Amino acid sequence: MSRCIAEHEMLPPGAPVVVGVSGGPDSLCLLHVLLRLRESQTDTFSIHVAHLNHGLRGEASQADADSVAGLATGWGLPVTVETADVRRLARERRLSVEEAARQARYAFLAAVAAGVGAPTVAVAHNADDQAETVLMHFLRGSGVGGLRGMLPETQISDLRLLIADGSVSNQQSTIRNLSLIRPLLTTSRSDIAAYCAEHNLEPRFDASNLDTTYFRNRLRHAVLPALEKASPGIRDRLLRLADVAGADAEVLRSALESARSLAVLAESPQAITFDLGAFRSLPLGLRRALVRDAAARLRSGLRDIDFLPVEAAAQLAMTGHAGARAPLPGGLSLTLSYDTFRIAPEGAPAVPAKLPLLSRDVCLPVAVPGVTRLPESPWALSAEVVSPGEWRLDEIEGNEDPWRAFLSWDTPRSLMLRARKPGDRFQPHGMGGAGQKISDFMITNKIPAAWRESLPLLTGGDAILWVCG
Protein backbone atom coordinates (compact mmCIF):
# COMPACT_ATOMS: atom_id res chain seq x y z
CA MET A 1 0.00 0.00 0.00
CA SER A 2 2.85 2.40 0.79
CA ARG A 3 4.32 1.70 -2.67
CA CYS A 4 0.94 2.44 -4.29
CA ILE A 5 0.68 5.76 -2.42
CA ALA A 6 4.21 6.76 -3.40
CA GLU A 7 3.89 5.63 -7.04
CA HIS A 8 0.76 7.69 -7.62
CA GLU A 9 1.74 10.57 -5.27
CA MET A 10 -1.63 10.20 -3.59
CA LEU A 11 -1.11 12.29 -0.46
CA PRO A 12 -0.15 15.99 -0.75
CA PRO A 13 2.33 16.80 2.08
CA GLY A 14 0.82 18.72 4.95
CA ALA A 15 -2.76 18.43 3.68
CA PRO A 16 -5.65 16.67 5.44
CA VAL A 17 -7.10 13.45 4.01
CA VAL A 18 -10.63 12.21 4.71
CA VAL A 19 -10.68 8.43 5.22
CA GLY A 20 -13.95 6.61 4.65
CA VAL A 21 -14.23 3.98 7.39
CA SER A 22 -17.08 1.48 7.51
CA GLY A 23 -15.55 -0.50 10.37
CA GLY A 24 -14.89 -3.57 8.21
CA PRO A 25 -11.44 -5.14 7.69
CA ASP A 26 -10.58 -3.19 4.53
CA SER A 27 -11.23 0.30 5.87
CA LEU A 28 -9.77 -0.56 9.28
CA CYS A 29 -6.57 -1.76 7.61
CA LEU A 30 -6.47 1.40 5.46
CA LEU A 31 -6.87 3.70 8.45
CA HIS A 32 -4.24 1.85 10.50
CA VAL A 33 -1.66 1.90 7.67
CA LEU A 34 -2.27 5.61 7.02
CA LEU A 35 -1.87 6.32 10.72
CA ARG A 36 1.47 4.48 10.80
CA LEU A 37 2.57 6.22 7.61
CA ARG A 38 1.70 9.60 9.08
CA GLU A 39 3.76 8.88 12.19
CA SER A 40 6.79 7.86 10.11
CA GLN A 41 6.91 11.06 8.02
CA THR A 42 8.18 14.51 8.90
CA ASP A 43 6.27 16.64 6.38
CA THR A 44 3.14 14.67 7.13
CA PHE A 45 -0.59 14.77 6.46
CA SER A 46 -3.52 14.88 8.88
CA ILE A 47 -6.38 12.36 8.99
CA HIS A 48 -10.12 12.94 9.37
CA VAL A 49 -12.30 9.85 9.76
CA ALA A 50 -15.74 9.79 8.09
CA HIS A 51 -18.49 7.17 8.53
CA LEU A 52 -21.94 7.13 6.94
CA ASN A 53 -24.64 5.04 8.57
CA HIS A 54 -26.73 3.87 5.61
CA GLY A 55 -29.61 2.90 7.89
CA LEU A 56 -30.04 -0.48 6.17
CA ARG A 57 -29.37 -2.84 9.09
CA GLY A 58 -31.06 -1.18 12.05
CA GLU A 59 -29.19 -1.67 15.32
CA ALA A 60 -26.24 -3.31 13.57
CA SER A 61 -25.71 -0.20 11.44
CA GLN A 62 -25.80 2.00 14.53
CA ALA A 63 -23.35 -0.31 16.29
CA ASP A 64 -20.94 0.06 13.35
CA ALA A 65 -21.21 3.85 13.58
CA ASP A 66 -20.59 3.81 17.33
CA SER A 67 -17.61 1.49 16.87
CA VAL A 68 -15.95 3.72 14.26
CA ALA A 69 -16.55 6.85 16.35
CA GLY A 70 -15.06 5.17 19.41
CA LEU A 71 -12.06 3.85 17.48
CA ALA A 72 -11.27 7.25 15.95
CA THR A 73 -11.56 8.98 19.30
CA GLY A 74 -9.33 6.35 20.91
CA TRP A 75 -6.69 6.89 18.23
CA GLY A 76 -6.90 10.67 18.66
CA LEU A 77 -8.47 11.33 15.26
CA PRO A 78 -11.30 13.74 14.43
CA VAL A 79 -14.38 11.93 13.13
CA THR A 80 -17.64 12.80 11.38
CA VAL A 81 -20.56 10.36 11.58
CA GLU A 82 -23.86 10.92 9.79
CA THR A 83 -26.94 8.87 8.87
CA ALA A 84 -28.65 8.60 5.47
CA ASP A 85 -32.02 7.10 4.58
CA VAL A 86 -30.73 5.07 1.64
CA ARG A 87 -34.01 3.27 0.96
CA ARG A 88 -35.83 6.58 0.63
CA LEU A 89 -33.11 7.88 -1.68
CA ALA A 90 -33.38 4.73 -3.79
CA ARG A 91 -37.14 5.25 -4.17
CA GLU A 92 -36.89 8.96 -4.93
CA ARG A 93 -34.06 8.58 -7.45
CA ARG A 94 -35.28 5.28 -8.90
CA LEU A 95 -31.96 3.61 -8.10
CA SER A 96 -31.07 0.20 -6.75
CA VAL A 97 -30.32 0.17 -3.04
CA GLU A 98 -26.68 -0.61 -3.91
CA GLU A 99 -26.37 2.41 -6.18
CA ALA A 100 -28.23 4.73 -3.80
CA ALA A 101 -25.86 3.68 -0.99
CA ARG A 102 -22.85 4.34 -3.22
CA GLN A 103 -24.17 7.74 -4.28
CA ALA A 104 -25.01 8.76 -0.72
CA ARG A 105 -21.63 7.57 0.56
CA TYR A 106 -19.55 9.52 -1.94
CA ALA A 107 -21.72 12.62 -1.59
CA PHE A 108 -21.17 12.43 2.18
CA LEU A 109 -17.40 11.96 1.85
CA ALA A 110 -17.20 14.89 -0.58
CA ALA A 111 -19.16 17.11 1.80
CA VAL A 112 -16.92 16.17 4.73
CA ALA A 113 -13.80 16.88 2.67
CA ALA A 114 -15.17 20.26 1.61
CA GLY A 115 -16.01 21.05 5.22
CA VAL A 116 -12.54 20.29 6.60
CA GLY A 117 -10.62 21.63 3.60
CA ALA A 118 -9.24 18.25 2.54
CA PRO A 119 -8.12 17.85 -1.10
CA THR A 120 -8.18 14.05 -0.86
CA VAL A 121 -10.63 11.29 0.10
CA ALA A 122 -9.29 7.76 0.71
CA VAL A 123 -11.45 4.64 0.37
CA ALA A 124 -10.58 0.98 0.92
CA HIS A 125 -11.34 -0.87 -2.32
CA ASN A 126 -8.99 -3.83 -2.68
CA ALA A 127 -7.70 -6.08 -5.47
CA ASP A 128 -10.58 -8.54 -5.07
CA ASP A 129 -13.06 -5.66 -5.36
CA GLN A 130 -11.28 -4.66 -8.56
CA ALA A 131 -11.58 -8.16 -10.06
CA GLU A 132 -15.30 -8.19 -9.22
CA THR A 133 -15.79 -4.76 -10.78
CA VAL A 134 -14.07 -5.75 -14.04
CA LEU A 135 -16.15 -8.93 -14.27
CA MET A 136 -19.34 -6.98 -13.51
CA HIS A 137 -18.58 -4.49 -16.28
CA PHE A 138 -17.74 -7.30 -18.69
CA LEU A 139 -21.07 -9.01 -18.01
CA ARG A 140 -22.91 -5.73 -18.63
CA GLY A 141 -21.19 -5.25 -21.98
CA SER A 142 -19.12 -2.23 -20.97
CA GLY A 143 -16.52 -0.65 -23.23
CA VAL A 144 -12.81 -0.22 -22.56
CA GLY A 145 -13.52 2.46 -19.97
CA GLY A 146 -15.54 -0.02 -17.90
CA LEU A 147 -13.09 -2.91 -18.29
CA ARG A 148 -10.31 -0.85 -16.71
CA GLY A 149 -12.27 -1.06 -13.47
CA MET A 150 -11.52 1.36 -10.66
CA LEU A 151 -8.57 3.74 -10.85
CA PRO A 152 -6.00 4.10 -8.05
CA GLU A 153 -6.63 7.85 -8.18
CA THR A 154 -9.43 9.82 -9.81
CA GLN A 155 -11.60 12.89 -9.22
CA ILE A 156 -14.80 12.79 -7.18
CA SER A 157 -16.42 14.76 -10.01
CA ASP A 158 -15.83 11.76 -12.33
CA LEU A 159 -18.14 9.59 -10.20
CA ARG A 160 -21.28 11.12 -11.78
CA LEU A 161 -23.08 11.78 -8.50
CA LEU A 162 -26.84 12.27 -8.82
CA ILE A 163 -27.68 12.91 -5.18
CA ALA A 164 -27.57 16.60 -4.40
CA ASP A 165 -28.70 17.44 -0.88
CA GLY A 166 -27.25 20.94 -0.74
CA SER A 167 -24.09 19.90 1.07
CA VAL A 168 -22.65 18.63 -2.19
CA SER A 169 -24.42 20.60 -4.90
CA ASN A 170 -23.48 23.94 -3.35
CA GLN A 171 -19.75 23.10 -3.38
CA GLN A 172 -19.21 22.04 -6.98
CA SER A 173 -15.99 24.03 -7.38
CA THR A 174 -14.51 22.20 -4.39
CA ILE A 175 -15.65 18.80 -5.64
CA ARG A 176 -14.15 19.39 -9.07
CA ASN A 177 -10.71 19.58 -7.43
CA LEU A 178 -11.24 16.74 -4.96
CA SER A 179 -9.14 13.59 -5.45
CA LEU A 180 -10.37 10.10 -4.61
CA ILE A 181 -7.60 7.61 -3.83
CA ARG A 182 -7.68 3.81 -3.42
CA PRO A 183 -4.38 2.83 -1.76
CA LEU A 184 -5.44 -0.83 -1.27
CA LEU A 185 -6.36 -1.46 -4.91
CA THR A 186 -3.42 -3.81 -5.43
CA THR A 187 -3.76 -5.54 -2.03
CA SER A 188 -5.72 -8.80 -1.79
CA ARG A 189 -8.54 -9.40 0.67
CA SER A 190 -6.55 -12.26 2.26
CA ASP A 191 -3.53 -10.00 2.86
CA ILE A 192 -5.80 -7.43 4.48
CA ALA A 193 -7.27 -10.07 6.79
CA ALA A 194 -3.75 -11.19 7.72
CA TYR A 195 -2.73 -7.60 8.47
CA CYS A 196 -5.74 -7.07 10.74
CA ALA A 197 -4.91 -10.27 12.65
CA GLU A 198 -1.23 -9.35 12.97
CA HIS A 199 -2.03 -5.92 14.44
CA ASN A 200 -4.91 -7.09 16.65
CA LEU A 201 -7.47 -5.01 14.80
CA GLU A 202 -11.08 -6.03 15.41
CA PRO A 203 -13.18 -5.32 12.31
CA ARG A 204 -16.95 -5.20 12.32
CA PHE A 205 -18.87 -7.85 10.35
CA ASP A 206 -21.48 -6.67 7.85
CA ALA A 207 -23.99 -9.47 7.30
CA SER A 208 -25.33 -7.76 4.16
CA ASN A 209 -22.09 -8.72 2.40
CA LEU A 210 -23.45 -12.29 2.34
CA ASP A 211 -26.80 -11.30 0.80
CA THR A 212 -26.71 -12.68 -2.74
CA THR A 213 -29.73 -10.65 -3.83
CA TYR A 214 -27.10 -7.97 -4.51
CA PHE A 215 -25.36 -8.43 -7.85
CA ARG A 216 -21.84 -7.87 -6.54
CA ASN A 217 -22.35 -10.39 -3.76
CA ARG A 218 -23.54 -13.00 -6.27
CA LEU A 219 -20.35 -12.46 -8.23
CA ARG A 220 -18.25 -12.67 -5.08
CA HIS A 221 -19.81 -15.76 -3.53
CA ALA A 222 -21.05 -17.76 -6.54
CA VAL A 223 -19.76 -16.66 -9.94
CA LEU A 224 -16.10 -15.96 -9.17
CA PRO A 225 -15.57 -19.15 -7.12
CA ALA A 226 -17.07 -21.17 -10.00
CA LEU A 227 -14.81 -19.41 -12.49
CA GLU A 228 -11.80 -19.95 -10.24
CA LYS A 229 -12.59 -23.65 -10.08
CA ALA A 230 -12.94 -23.88 -13.87
CA SER A 231 -9.98 -21.60 -14.60
CA PRO A 232 -7.58 -21.17 -11.67
CA GLY A 233 -6.03 -17.70 -11.48
CA ILE A 234 -9.03 -15.91 -12.98
CA ARG A 235 -8.77 -13.05 -10.45
CA ASP A 236 -5.20 -12.27 -11.48
CA ARG A 237 -6.18 -12.32 -15.15
CA LEU A 238 -9.06 -9.94 -14.49
CA LEU A 239 -6.62 -7.57 -12.79
CA ARG A 240 -4.28 -7.78 -15.78
CA LEU A 241 -7.24 -7.07 -18.05
CA ALA A 242 -7.92 -3.93 -16.01
CA ASP A 243 -4.32 -2.78 -16.52
CA VAL A 244 -4.43 -3.42 -20.28
CA ALA A 245 -7.84 -1.77 -20.68
CA GLY A 246 -6.67 1.21 -18.63
CA ALA A 247 -3.77 1.84 -21.01
CA ASP A 248 -6.04 1.39 -24.03
CA ALA A 249 -8.59 3.77 -22.50
CA GLU A 250 -5.97 6.54 -22.38
CA VAL A 251 -5.33 6.11 -26.11
CA LEU A 252 -9.07 6.09 -26.81
CA ARG A 253 -9.62 9.21 -24.73
CA SER A 254 -7.16 11.18 -26.84
CA ALA A 255 -8.73 9.91 -30.07
CA LEU A 256 -12.22 10.61 -28.69
CA GLU A 257 -11.40 14.26 -28.01
CA SER A 258 -10.24 14.68 -31.61
CA ALA A 259 -13.34 12.87 -32.92
CA ARG A 260 -15.61 15.03 -30.77
CA SER A 261 -14.12 18.24 -32.15
CA LEU A 262 -14.61 16.90 -35.69
CA ALA A 263 -18.13 15.49 -35.41
CA VAL A 264 -19.96 17.56 -32.76
CA LEU A 265 -21.72 20.60 -34.19
CA ALA A 266 -23.35 21.89 -31.01
CA GLU A 267 -23.61 20.85 -27.37
CA SER A 268 -25.82 22.10 -24.56
CA PRO A 269 -26.93 20.53 -21.26
CA GLN A 270 -30.05 19.31 -23.12
CA ALA A 271 -28.70 17.96 -26.42
CA ILE A 272 -25.62 17.12 -28.47
CA THR A 273 -25.85 17.43 -32.25
CA PHE A 274 -23.47 15.68 -34.66
CA ASP A 275 -22.48 16.19 -38.27
CA LEU A 276 -23.66 12.96 -39.86
CA GLY A 277 -21.01 12.87 -42.58
CA ALA A 278 -18.17 13.44 -40.14
CA PHE A 279 -19.56 10.78 -37.80
CA ARG A 280 -19.85 8.25 -40.60
CA SER A 281 -16.24 8.87 -41.62
CA LEU A 282 -14.94 7.66 -38.25
CA PRO A 283 -13.87 4.10 -37.35
CA LEU A 284 -16.45 1.91 -35.63
CA GLY A 285 -14.75 2.10 -32.22
CA LEU A 286 -14.86 5.89 -32.21
CA ARG A 287 -18.47 5.95 -33.39
CA ARG A 288 -19.47 3.76 -30.45
CA ALA A 289 -17.33 5.83 -28.08
CA LEU A 290 -18.96 9.09 -29.25
CA VAL A 291 -22.47 7.75 -28.64
CA ARG A 292 -21.51 6.39 -25.21
CA ASP A 293 -19.71 9.63 -24.34
CA ALA A 294 -22.68 11.78 -25.40
CA ALA A 295 -25.08 9.77 -23.24
CA ALA A 296 -22.75 10.09 -20.26
CA ARG A 297 -22.31 13.85 -20.77
CA LEU A 298 -26.06 14.46 -20.95
CA ARG A 299 -26.94 12.16 -18.06
CA SER A 300 -24.28 12.63 -15.41
CA GLY A 301 -25.69 9.82 -13.26
CA LEU A 302 -25.40 7.13 -15.95
CA ARG A 303 -22.90 4.40 -15.15
CA ASP A 304 -21.94 1.14 -16.86
CA ILE A 305 -23.86 1.92 -20.06
CA ASP A 306 -24.71 -1.37 -21.77
CA PHE A 307 -23.24 -2.26 -25.14
CA LEU A 308 -26.45 -3.16 -26.98
CA PRO A 309 -28.25 0.24 -26.96
CA VAL A 310 -24.99 2.00 -27.85
CA GLU A 311 -24.39 -0.39 -30.74
CA ALA A 312 -27.97 -0.06 -32.00
CA ALA A 313 -27.82 3.75 -31.91
CA ALA A 314 -24.43 3.92 -33.62
CA GLN A 315 -25.66 1.52 -36.31
CA LEU A 316 -28.82 3.58 -36.88
CA ALA A 317 -26.67 6.67 -37.44
CA MET A 318 -24.85 4.77 -40.19
CA THR A 319 -27.80 3.26 -42.05
CA GLY A 320 -31.04 4.91 -40.88
CA HIS A 321 -33.26 7.42 -42.67
CA ALA A 322 -34.22 10.94 -41.60
CA GLY A 323 -36.64 10.83 -38.66
CA ALA A 324 -35.47 7.42 -37.39
CA ARG A 325 -34.87 7.10 -33.65
CA ALA A 326 -32.94 4.76 -31.37
CA PRO A 327 -33.48 4.69 -27.58
CA LEU A 328 -30.56 5.14 -25.20
CA PRO A 329 -30.36 4.75 -21.40
CA GLY A 330 -31.46 7.57 -19.13
CA GLY A 331 -34.51 8.52 -21.20
CA LEU A 332 -32.33 9.67 -24.11
CA SER A 333 -32.68 8.90 -27.79
CA LEU A 334 -30.68 9.35 -30.98
CA THR A 335 -32.71 11.05 -33.74
CA LEU A 336 -31.58 11.26 -37.36
CA SER A 337 -32.03 14.25 -39.67
CA TYR A 338 -30.84 14.57 -43.27
CA ASP A 339 -27.25 15.65 -42.58
CA THR A 340 -27.14 15.67 -38.78
CA PHE A 341 -28.30 13.64 -35.81
CA ARG A 342 -28.69 14.50 -32.18
CA ILE A 343 -28.80 12.78 -28.84
CA ALA A 344 -31.31 14.37 -26.47
CA PRO A 345 -34.11 13.48 -24.03
CA GLU A 346 -36.87 11.42 -25.63
CA GLY A 347 -39.58 13.70 -27.03
CA ALA A 348 -37.51 16.91 -26.95
CA PRO A 349 -38.41 19.22 -29.87
CA ALA A 350 -36.09 18.95 -32.86
CA VAL A 351 -33.87 21.99 -33.29
CA PRO A 352 -31.23 22.20 -36.04
CA ALA A 353 -27.63 22.53 -34.92
CA LYS A 354 -26.89 24.94 -37.76
CA LEU A 355 -29.10 27.70 -36.33
CA PRO A 356 -28.14 30.20 -33.64
CA LEU A 357 -30.53 29.67 -30.73
CA LEU A 358 -31.16 31.40 -27.41
CA SER A 359 -32.95 30.30 -24.26
CA ARG A 360 -35.92 32.49 -23.34
CA ASP A 361 -34.20 33.71 -20.17
CA VAL A 362 -31.05 34.92 -22.01
CA CYS A 363 -30.58 38.59 -22.91
CA LEU A 364 -27.13 39.39 -24.32
CA PRO A 365 -25.67 42.91 -24.59
CA VAL A 366 -24.16 43.30 -28.07
CA ALA A 367 -20.66 44.73 -28.38
CA VAL A 368 -20.47 47.45 -31.08
CA PRO A 369 -17.94 47.13 -32.52
CA GLY A 370 -17.03 43.63 -31.40
CA VAL A 371 -18.03 39.97 -31.25
CA THR A 372 -20.85 38.65 -29.02
CA ARG A 373 -20.80 34.88 -28.56
CA LEU A 374 -24.01 32.92 -28.00
CA PRO A 375 -23.89 30.64 -24.94
CA GLU A 376 -23.56 26.88 -25.57
CA SER A 377 -23.33 27.50 -29.31
CA PRO A 378 -20.64 27.87 -31.98
CA TRP A 379 -22.45 31.01 -33.23
CA ALA A 380 -21.45 34.63 -32.60
CA LEU A 381 -22.70 38.07 -33.69
CA SER A 382 -20.04 40.29 -35.22
CA ALA A 383 -20.87 44.00 -35.31
CA GLU A 384 -18.94 46.84 -36.93
CA VAL A 385 -19.58 50.50 -37.64
CA VAL A 386 -18.88 51.46 -41.26
CA SER A 387 -18.56 54.91 -42.80
CA PRO A 388 -20.88 56.12 -45.57
CA GLY A 389 -19.46 55.05 -48.90
CA GLU A 390 -17.87 51.81 -47.69
CA TRP A 391 -20.94 49.97 -49.01
CA ARG A 392 -22.87 50.98 -52.12
CA LEU A 393 -26.62 51.45 -51.68
CA ASP A 394 -27.41 48.77 -54.24
CA GLU A 395 -25.23 46.29 -52.30
CA ILE A 396 -27.13 47.05 -49.11
CA GLU A 397 -30.58 46.87 -50.68
CA GLY A 398 -29.62 43.78 -52.67
CA ASN A 399 -28.26 41.89 -49.66
CA GLU A 400 -29.46 38.27 -49.87
CA ASP A 401 -27.40 36.89 -46.98
CA PRO A 402 -29.96 36.00 -44.25
CA TRP A 403 -27.24 36.27 -41.61
CA ARG A 404 -26.19 39.84 -42.45
CA ALA A 405 -28.14 43.02 -41.71
CA PHE A 406 -27.43 46.72 -42.29
CA LEU A 407 -28.77 49.17 -39.69
CA SER A 408 -28.80 52.93 -39.56
CA TRP A 409 -26.35 54.13 -36.92
CA ASP A 410 -27.13 57.83 -36.95
CA THR A 411 -27.98 57.61 -33.26
CA PRO A 412 -25.81 55.02 -31.43
CA ARG A 413 -27.86 52.90 -29.05
CA SER A 414 -27.54 49.85 -26.82
CA LEU A 415 -28.25 46.66 -28.73
CA MET A 416 -29.40 43.38 -27.19
CA LEU A 417 -29.89 39.82 -28.43
CA ARG A 418 -32.83 37.93 -26.97
CA ALA A 419 -35.49 35.36 -27.86
CA ARG A 420 -39.09 36.17 -28.74
CA LYS A 421 -41.54 37.32 -26.06
CA PRO A 422 -45.35 37.11 -26.16
CA GLY A 423 -46.80 40.08 -28.05
CA ASP A 424 -43.54 41.12 -29.75
CA ARG A 425 -44.10 43.28 -32.85
CA PHE A 426 -41.77 44.77 -35.43
CA GLN A 427 -41.83 46.59 -38.76
CA PRO A 428 -40.49 44.36 -41.55
CA HIS A 429 -38.42 46.08 -44.21
CA GLY A 430 -40.63 47.18 -47.10
CA MET A 431 -43.92 47.28 -45.16
CA GLY A 432 -43.97 51.04 -44.72
CA GLY A 433 -45.51 52.05 -41.43
CA ALA A 434 -47.38 48.81 -40.88
CA GLY A 435 -46.26 46.64 -38.00
CA GLN A 436 -46.59 42.90 -37.62
CA LYS A 437 -46.50 40.41 -34.78
CA ILE A 438 -43.27 38.43 -34.68
CA SER A 439 -45.31 35.24 -34.23
CA ASP A 440 -47.36 35.97 -37.39
CA PHE A 441 -44.20 36.82 -39.32
CA MET A 442 -42.61 33.50 -38.35
CA ILE A 443 -45.72 31.52 -39.29
CA THR A 444 -45.99 33.31 -42.64
CA ASN A 445 -42.35 32.51 -43.37
CA LYS A 446 -42.89 28.85 -42.39
CA ILE A 447 -40.44 28.85 -39.50
CA PRO A 448 -41.06 25.55 -37.62
CA ALA A 449 -42.84 25.97 -34.29
CA ALA A 450 -40.00 24.27 -32.39
CA TRP A 451 -37.59 27.02 -33.49
CA ARG A 452 -39.77 30.10 -32.99
CA GLU A 453 -39.14 30.45 -29.26
CA SER A 454 -35.35 30.39 -29.68
CA LEU A 455 -34.35 32.33 -32.81
CA PRO A 456 -32.47 35.46 -31.70
CA LEU A 457 -33.91 38.93 -32.14
CA LEU A 458 -31.70 42.02 -32.28
CA THR A 459 -33.27 44.86 -30.31
CA GLY A 460 -32.47 48.51 -29.69
CA GLY A 461 -34.43 49.94 -26.80
CA ASP A 462 -38.04 48.81 -27.23
CA ALA A 463 -37.67 48.28 -30.98
CA ILE A 464 -36.98 44.95 -32.68
CA LEU A 465 -34.47 45.75 -35.41
CA TRP A 466 -33.78 42.35 -36.94
CA VAL A 467 -35.18 38.83 -36.83
CA CYS A 468 -31.86 37.05 -37.27
CA GLY A 469 -31.80 34.75 -40.29
Image: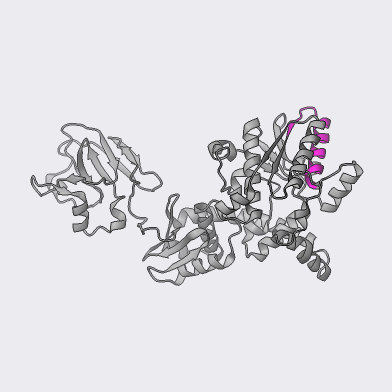
- In magenta, the rendered stretch is 26-48
Q: Is residue 142 left or right of residue 42?
A: left
State yes or no: residue 29 in magenta.
yes
Q: Who's the residue at 58% across and 49% down the image?
A: 160
Which quarter of the rendering shows the N terminus?
A: top right
State the image coordinates of residue 45 (x, y, percent, origin top left): 74, 31
Q: Is residue 16 above or below residue 207?
A: above
Identify the residue at the far top of this view.
Answer: 42
Identify the residue at the far front of this view.
Answer: 59
State the image coordinates of residue 199 (x, y, percent, origin top left): 90, 41
State the image coordinates of residue 127 (x, y, percent, origin top left): 77, 53
Q: Is residue 69 above or below residue 221?
A: above
Identify the residue at the far left of this view.
Answer: 432
Q: Is the stretch drawn in magenta largely helix, strand or loop?
A: helix
Residue closer to the observer: 327 or 200: 200
Is residue 155 in view from this perspective?
Answer: no
State yes or no: residue 209 in magenta.
no
Occupied quadrant, residue 74: top right
Q: What is the count of numbered marks?
A: 0
Q: Is residue 46 left or right of residue 367?
A: right
State the image coordinates of residue 468 (x, y, percent, origin top left): 25, 48
Is residue 332 in view from this perspective?
Answer: yes
Q: Is residue 308 above or below residue 206?
A: below
Residue closer to the observer: 123 or 153: 123
Q: Who's the residue at 14% across and 44% down the image?
A: 392
Colouring used for the render: one colour
